[in-house]
Structure formats: structure tokens, C-alpha cells
């Protein structure tokens, strides 16, 4: 079909063919211009947390689409001990070097029936039922590791220290989760340079109530090391590594979407897996 | 023998084709920005690494002194000296993610509509290869290399095209499925398990991208080689053929699986 040599003088298509071509090529040129213009337009919109707003809307649309599918009672895959992989250390943002671990306390804000934050020691947390799991930790960069984690499930923690409710009624963490304030924020301990904590994450309530979301104090059978977030870090297999905050200083139950360190740098706030 | 116009590509096919072109480009580009945050894949056989994709100099090539300043950006080299870079591709993960997860919708919707159209219109009969096509494709390749001088049967798509165009549909589906497997490994864990876990799904996703790039190179090369009449067909819909070819092609279009 390709080896046709059209002799222009004897071509019976002459009157019709250029018309079809011209019309189609005008379309093609218009299309190409609009693709170029569309991409230019998208990337030049005013930015919301480092992203042109239509693309930020895109991330929020995805959050709604996949967030509705979060089932707090459906565990992420767990592994047998022989599948555990090498431990990788990536970030220590928000953990200052001269922090006095001995004086660590966990401040919990927005606890039902408490107007001011309550303070807990590590022994208060270890007094809650312990939970152990071997799960995969997925970094948003693309690497992953399988580790053994031990700690207290956030949902058990919330049973004991429940969030306030929207209706003002007594909280029922398992029975009436929709009435709880919709977010949990977590930050590193406040410092002189960062009075709100140098690293901070926000969680939606279904993810916070997920059956494997854990306040972790032991990793691979050893007490949590300083660089992995001693004395208490978050492990949340339904979120990317960026949400697994180390050295938690504050837990905040809130009805306002909490600030999130990496969401402010252009990442997805939801960051769900 | 008189020439005539043959309506080759329906309007829908042409739209699907040209929508996919920039979308696939954006998906591969943003995918690379994501991949580069953790670029680990190599071609390693028997313990010897033959090839590491993207050596570090690719990310921040230093501009030579004659390089125009407006085409470069200020940066620092490994020793901390001020240099100018031709481009900077590292540390653009967030950017890669928000473009990727925006255009993934367009890629998926366009792909699903295309596959649905092929099925409903019966166009699949022209594209899905029969078993004999795998034998015939060898003859097509030999003919393209001018090593076989016979005449190929008149058909909308030859055997090699059928295999290639069917493969990209399968690869597109594989991209979406491995993509979701990496994107939601906890929520859609059944899918991640289907691809033997998170790392394997990421590996397949990467290699299928290379498959798309390979297809793209061959496809564009062939379009250039075959020439204007054929290329114009994907824009106008029409191709100039002989009367005889047209009657064969039109009979095939309304007929059974070729």
C-alpha cells in the first residue's frame, strides 16, 4: 500500500483529497496547540503547597476516590519472620541531637473531657495491650523493607484516651467512629527552633483507626533505636513511610485537617497505600 | 490501475491514538521523575552488571563553558563548587507523582474506551493476530529488510503490525494493573500479590515502560519508512489505494477475523 506513485496529472482524487487533508490538518494543528497550551496552563497555575492548583485538586480527587475505600478492619499483608529484610535508615527530620530522652512525655490534645492536653509517660503506653506484626514499610521513593514491629495499636490507645466527638456525646471509638473528630495529627516534640515540632503528619480517622496502625516502641525484637525514633514512633502500613513519624511528642485529635510536613512540599496529603 | 480513497481509520481511532500520544509521553516522563528517586534497576547476568540505567551524570550534566547561560541553571558539583547544569532531574519526585497520578486517569480512560471501541466495532478482527500471524510476521520483517521479494497479502494491518498493536493494548492494561499494585499495595493487596509483591510489580511496571519505548521507536521508524500516504491516514482517516486494494480491504472490514 505504501509504494504508490501518484501521478498528479492523472490523479482522479485531486479535487476531493486536498480538501479532506486541509480540514484534518487544521484540526491536527489546533489539537497540537491545545495540548501544548493545556500543559502550559496546568503547570503555570497558582500553587497550593508547591503544586499548581489543578494538579493539587487531582491529588485531592484521588484522596477521595481511594480514601473512601479505606477499611479500618482490613489488615495489610503480614509476613513470616524469614521474609524480614535489611533495615534502612532514611530520614531523621525533626529529631534534634541534644534531645533529652529521659524527660520525654507524650502530650495528647483534644482528649474527650479534657480542655487541656494530657501528658503520658512511656510506661503509661506500655501498660496498654501490646501488639506485634511483620509488615512491609513502603517509602514514597520506591524502596521497601519488611520489618517486625511491636507497640500499641492506635485504636487501643484511642479506646483508653478517646478523641472528642462532633456531637459532644460520649465517644465510642469502635462503635461510632463517624462521630469522632475526623483527624489525628502527630508531631515531634516541640523545640526552641520549632515550637510546633519539626516534623508533623496528619491522618484521616479511618487510617488512624486501622487495625495495624501502631504506636511502636520495639523494632525487630530490640527497643526502638534513637535514629528509628525512640522512644515512640508511628508505624502505619496503610500509608507511605513519610507518615510513619519518628519520636512522637504530640498527638492531636482535631476537626481541622492537620498540617503535614511533606504535603507542604508538594506531596499528597493522604499518602495512602 | 486507478487510485482511489479508502477510509482507513475511523474518527474514534484517530482520537484515541492522538490523545494517547501526549498522555503516554507525560506518563513516561513523570514516571522517570519518580523512578529516579530510587533508580536501582540494572541489567545484571551471572553477577556481572552490564548496564546501569541512568548513570549519575545524566541527572545533572555540567554545562561546558560555551553553553548558553539561559539554557542552564546554577548548581553545585560533588565537591561543592559552583557550576552550571544543563538540566537538573534529581529531587523532583513530588512533581513526578502529581503529574503521574493526574494523567493516569486520562491514560486509563482513553485505553478502556479504545479497547471497548475495538470490541464493539469489530475492528479487533483487523488487529488481533491469528496463530498464522506469528509465522507471517517473520516474512514481514524479512520483506522490510529487503530480504524477501514476494508480495504480501493486502490487509489493513500486516502480521507484524497485528502483533505489535495487540501487544501495546496488553502492555497498557499491564501498566494500569501493575500501577495500581504499586500505588495501593495495602488496599488492593490482591493485585499486588498477583504480581508477586510490591518490588516485583514495580519491576514489571518499569520493564513494560521500556517495552513502550521500544514500540515507540520501531513504530515511528516504520511510519517514516512507509511514508506520507500512510501517516496522513492517521490524521485524515483516508489513504490512497488502488481500486483493487480497496475492494479487498472493504470486504475484510465487513468480514471475519483476518
Image: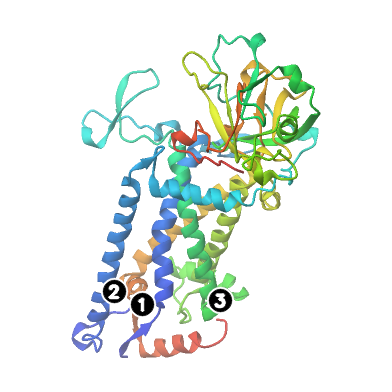
Q: Residue at x 46, y 39 (%)?
A: B94
Q: Nearer the viewer, residue B158 or A186?
A: A186
Percent of width and height locating residue A143? 59, 35
Pick the quarter of the image with the N terminus of chain A: bottom left
Instruction: Please state the chain letter of the residue tagged with numbered disc 3 in the rendered image.
Output: B
Q: Which residue is mark 1?
A: B237
Mark 3 neighbour density, 10 Å: few (under 14) some (14–19) many (20 or more): few
Q: Nearer the viewer, residue B208 or B230?
A: B208
Q: Which residue is mark 2?
A: A24
Labelled pair 3, 2 in contact (Cβ < 8 Å): no
**Element under label 1?**
loop
**Element under label 2?**
helix
- How many angstroms separate mark 3 from mark 2 (CA)? 26 Å
Q: Residue at x 63, y 41 (%)?
A: A205
Instruction: Please state the chain letter of the residue tagged with numbered disc 1 in the rendered image.
Output: B
Labelled pair 2, 1 in contact (Cβ < 8 Å): yes
Percent of width and height locating residue A231? 68, 18
A241 w.r.t. B256: above or below: above
- Residue B119: assigned label: 3
Instruction: Please state the chain letter of the residue tagged with numbered disc 2 in the rendered image.
Output: A
Amino acid at each position: 500500500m505504501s509504494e504508490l506513485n501518484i501521478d498528479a496529472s492523472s490523479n482522479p482524487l485531486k479535487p476531493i483529497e486536498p480538501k479532506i487533508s486541509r480540514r484534518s490538518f487544521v484540526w491536527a494543528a489546533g489539537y497540537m496547540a491545545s495540548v501544548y497550551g493545556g500543559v502550559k496552563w496546568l503547570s503555570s497555575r497558582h500553587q497550593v503547597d508547591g503544586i499548581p492548583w489543578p494538579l493539587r485538586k487531582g491529588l485531592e480527587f484521588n484522596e477521595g476516590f481511594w480514601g473512601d475505600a479505606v477499611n479500618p478492619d482490613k489488615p495489610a499483608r503480614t509476613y513470616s519472620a524469614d521474609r524480614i529484610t535489611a533495615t534502612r535508615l532514611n530520614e531523621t527530620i525533626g529529631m534534634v541531637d541534644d534531645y533529652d530522652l529521659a524527660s520525654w512525655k507524650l502530650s495528647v490534645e483534644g482528649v474527650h473531657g479534657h480542655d487541656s492536653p494530657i501528658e503520658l509517660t512511656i510506661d503509661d503506653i506500655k501498660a496498654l495491650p501490646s501488639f506485634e506484626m511483620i509488615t512491609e514499610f513502603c517509602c514514597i521513593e520506591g524502596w521497601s523493607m519488611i520489618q517486625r514491629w511491636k507497640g500499641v495499636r492506635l485504636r487501643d490507645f484511642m479506646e483508653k484516651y478517646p478523641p472528642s466527638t462532633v456531637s459532644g456525646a460520649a465517644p465510642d471509638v469502635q462503635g461510632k467512629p463517624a462521630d469522632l473528630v475526623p483527624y489525628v495529627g502527630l508531631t515531634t516534640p516541640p523545640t526552641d527552633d520549632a515550637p510546633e515540632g519539626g516534623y508533623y503528619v496528619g491522618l484521616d480517622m479511618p487510617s488512624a483507626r486501622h487495625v495495624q496502625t501502631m504506636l511502636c516502641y520495639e523494632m525487630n525484637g530490640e527497643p526502638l533505636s534513637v535514629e528509628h525514633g525512640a522512644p515512640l514512633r508511628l508505624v502505619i502500613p496503610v500509608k507511605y513511610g513519610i507518615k510513619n513519624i519518628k519520636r512522637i511528642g504530640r498527638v492531636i485529635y482535631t476537626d481541622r485537617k492537620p498540617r503535614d510536613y511533606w504535603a507542604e512540599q508538594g506531596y499528597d496529603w493522604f499518602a495512602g497505600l | 490501475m486507478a487510485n482511489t480513497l479508502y477510509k482507513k481509520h475511523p474518527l474514534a481511532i484517530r482520537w484515541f491514538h492522538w490523545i494517547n500520544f501526549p498522555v503516554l509521553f507525560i506518563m513516561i516522563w513523570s514516571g522517570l521523575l519518580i523512578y529516579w528517586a530510587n533508580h536501582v534497576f540494572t541489567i545484571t547476568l551471572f553477577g556481572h552488571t552490564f548496564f546501569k540505567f541512568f548513570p549519575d551524570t545524566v541527572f545533572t550534566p555540567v554545562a561546558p563553558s560555551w553553553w548558553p547561560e539561559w539554557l542552564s541553571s546554577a548548581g553545585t558539583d560533588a565537591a561543592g563548587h559552583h557550576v552550571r547544569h544543563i538540566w537538573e532531574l534529581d529531587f523532583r519526585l513530588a512533581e513526578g507523582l502529581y503529574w503521574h497520578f493526574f494523567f493516569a486517569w486520562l491514560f486509563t480512560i482513553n485505553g478502556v474506551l479504545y479497547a471497548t471501541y475495538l470490541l464493539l466495532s469489530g475492528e479487533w478482527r483487523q488487529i488481533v493476530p491469528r496463530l498464522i500471524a506469528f509465522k507471517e510476521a517473520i516474512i514481514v520483517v524479512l520483506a522490510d529488510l529487503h530480504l524477501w521479494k514476494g508480495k504480501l497479502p493486502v490487509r489493513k494491518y500486516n502480521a507484524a503490525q497485528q502483533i505489535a498493536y495487540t501487544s501495546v493494548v496488553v502492555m497498557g492494561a499491564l501498566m494500569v494493573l501493575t500501577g495500581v499494585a504499586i500505588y495501593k499495595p495495602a488496599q488492593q493487596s490482591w493485585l499486588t500479590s498477583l504480581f508477586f509483591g510490591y518490588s516485583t510489580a514495580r519491576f514489571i511496571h518499569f520493564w513494560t515502560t521500556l517495552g513502550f519505548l521500544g514500540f515507540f521507536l520501531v513504530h515511528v521508524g516504520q511510519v517514516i519508512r512507509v511514508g506520507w500516504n500512510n501517516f496522513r491516514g492517521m490524521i485524515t482517516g483516508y489513504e490512497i489505494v488502488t481500486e483493487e486494494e480497496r475492494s479487498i480491504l472493504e470486504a475484510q472490514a465487513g468480514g471475519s477475523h483476518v
